[in-house]
Image (cartoon, grey):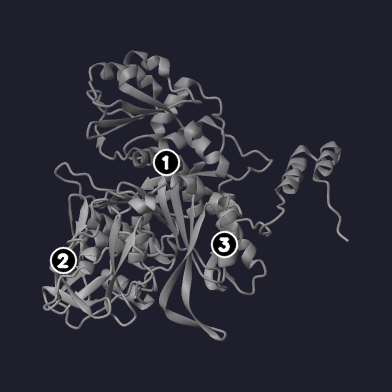
Amino acid sequence: MSRRIDKEKLVAAIKQSQELSDEQKADIIELIRAQKKYGLVWEDSPEDAEQELKSKLPILREVLERRILNDADGEHYPNHILIEGENLQALVALTYMYSGKIDVIYLDPPYNTGNGDFTYNDNIVDEEDEYRHSKWLSFMKKRLLIAKKLLSESGVIFISIDDYSQAQLKILCDSIFECSSNPKNSNFITTLIWNKQHSQQQGVFKKYHEYVLLYAKKKSQLGNVLSSASGIIEAGAMKKISVKNPASEFTFPAGVKVEAPDGTSFCGTYGDSEKVTVVQGPFVVQDGKTVFPIVLSAGWTQKKQMKSWFDGYETIDTKGQKIIEFYFNSTGKIKCRKQRGAITPSSFLPEFGMGSEQTSHLEEIMGVPNSFTNPKPVDMIKLFAEWFCPTDGLVLDFFAGSGTTMESVMQLNAEDGGHRQCILVTNNENGICENVTYERNKHIIQGYTTPKGEEVPGLTKNNLRYYKLKAVPRDSSTRSRIKLAAGSVDMLCIMENLYKEKDGFGNMGYYKGLRYFEENGRGMLVLLNTDLIPKVVEQLKRMDPSTPVHIYIYAPGDYAFDDEFEEVADKVELYPLPQPILNAYKNWLPKQDEVMLDVPDDYELTEAEQNESAKDFISKEE
């Protein structure tokens, strides 16, 4: 018979031990207290990417030759971000810029099928690996913990998965997102079912579906996000119908497209026998209502029932309560349904087409057959963003693959006039980041010609910036702190959304240890050479900025030389570097080994020596 262990007595005995070091005691006590009464149990597996963080700190460096910029005539388009690098290290870097700011995360992680889809420490994990599930759970947990930190209070995360790992992932996410057994207090929203429209033989059944797990950071903060989002209707009954030789398309609210046989109308069936003709789409918005032109078929008399269903030509009545919903039944007939109250999506996702169609779509964009097969549907991720991401929100995907998520965000912006920004992270294994993810979205922005010769115009109201993950030493020396501060300039540009660099600050001209960015009346100054503070203050006295200049200044700790800027305090906002970066990183970095890293001889630099070092590390070439 098993006996219950008194953990606190055991902890007390360990603390009194004379044979264990303090470090060993702390590790053992941490293990004891980490044990769960219920949940997954697995052996933590060390990861190369995590081990590197013991001696290196991640930063981002922009690859200038891959910039795609379309801002013109005072218009400022979303700056989408593509990061090439290991996603655990990139996530640590993102904590400084985006903690608590991401609205929607979509992930398509390796499914851990044992068929070579999951690589761990540069080794393919196959079904013969007895630690396969432990490695996968360790891998996912480290990333999901940071993902939760990045989400806004009303943020959500979608994770695609199938039966191989759905159960393990659900329990892991329940733990990370603090889900109780009481649905009212749980941050689990639902499991979405996606019909892939093609099957895989599994035993006695053919498998047609996959899952998308949906969690909120704090479900209580979601409020009326769904009911207020545009274009959301129950999607479970939606079907796509195709008519031969289409001349035009009419788009329904949920994105279902009806290909019309002529240039004017599509006829379908209303109810059991009555016909309705939808004419001259698409929808327009008038006085805050979605309006579409509808005429009755010849011979259909005006009935009281008809007036009840349609209330004229408006889908939403003056009280915002009556919804007319169009859908297709299994025979391809067009139908409509009236629903009162808030519109709620279904947990059964629409059919978004065969996997082969997604592959063909990617090949059309790239112009040649591609080794990346069955990417996720653009319309599916677009729907997720439409549900939960505001028009000026942020979408993150750190298993970016071919880059479907960025295309989805750009397409959604084009449809509703949004200004959403997308951030992608992927490694460059087999050249995927450079040759697939980047090239795909470059074509989407600039336009492309399909293999059949069709010209597809670009979504030109977008910018794309490409970054590579770099590193600086992780030690407490002054020189390393200066390297971190100097290396963070591109990250500061991302965080401030300020990229246009000037030749010096005002009339000061160019100095090493100083970089200034300005756009639309906003300014950002990076100042590593503190000898320049008096000159900067004098320049600020002559300026009348419309908004305070953000000054990031090298400092040994949290003090940003506030006293020296007292005369111009109303014109500046001061931020020390690099301490806030270290503060953001510290919760996600592994413990360093007991043996201290080698500390350079310049550990105790004077202030003058610090400034000279700063001049060495920050310049336009850096």
Q: Extreme front residue here?
A: 304
Q: Is residue 251 visible?
A: no
SS at mark 1 in the image: helix
Q: Using residue 443 as the reference point, say whether residue 372 is left or right of it.
A: right
Q: Earlier in the sequence, mark 3 or mark 2?
A: 3
Gap in angstroms between the C-alphas marked 2 and 1: 42 Å
User: Where is mark 3, residue-wise?
Assistant: 169
User: Where is mark 1, residue-wise?
Assistant: 97
Percent of width and height locating residue 502: 24, 33
Percent of width and height locating residue 558: 49, 25
Name the one closer to the observer, 15 or 602: 15
Identify the residue at image location x=55%, y=58%: 140
Q: Earlier in the sequence, mark 2 or mark 1?
A: 1
Q: Are the residues flagged by discs 3 and 2 in contact, CB closer than 8 Å?
A: no
Look at label 3 and name its amino acid.
Leu
Quadrant in which residue 42 is drawn:
bottom right
Identify the residue at image location x=51%, y=36%: 582
Q: Is residue 350 visible?
A: yes
Above or below, 408 relative to 586: below
Task: Please tell me how crowded label 1 is: few (under 14), some (14-19), or many (20+) other residues with Cα within 10 Å.
Answer: some
Task: Please tell me how crowded label 2 is: few (under 14), some (14-19), or many (20+) other residues with Cα within 10 Å.
Answer: some
Q: Using residue 540 as the reference point, say whether residue 455 is left or right of it.
A: left
Which quadrant: the C terminus? top left
Q: Using residue 379 as the reference point, say whether residue 592 is left or right of it.
A: right
Q: Earlier in the sequence, mark 1 or mark 3?
A: 1
User: Where is mark 2, residue-wise?
Assistant: 281
Percent of width and height locating residue 564: 39, 15
Look at label 2 and name its amino acid.
Gly
SS at mark 3 in the image: helix
Identify the residue at image location x=31%, y=60%: 407
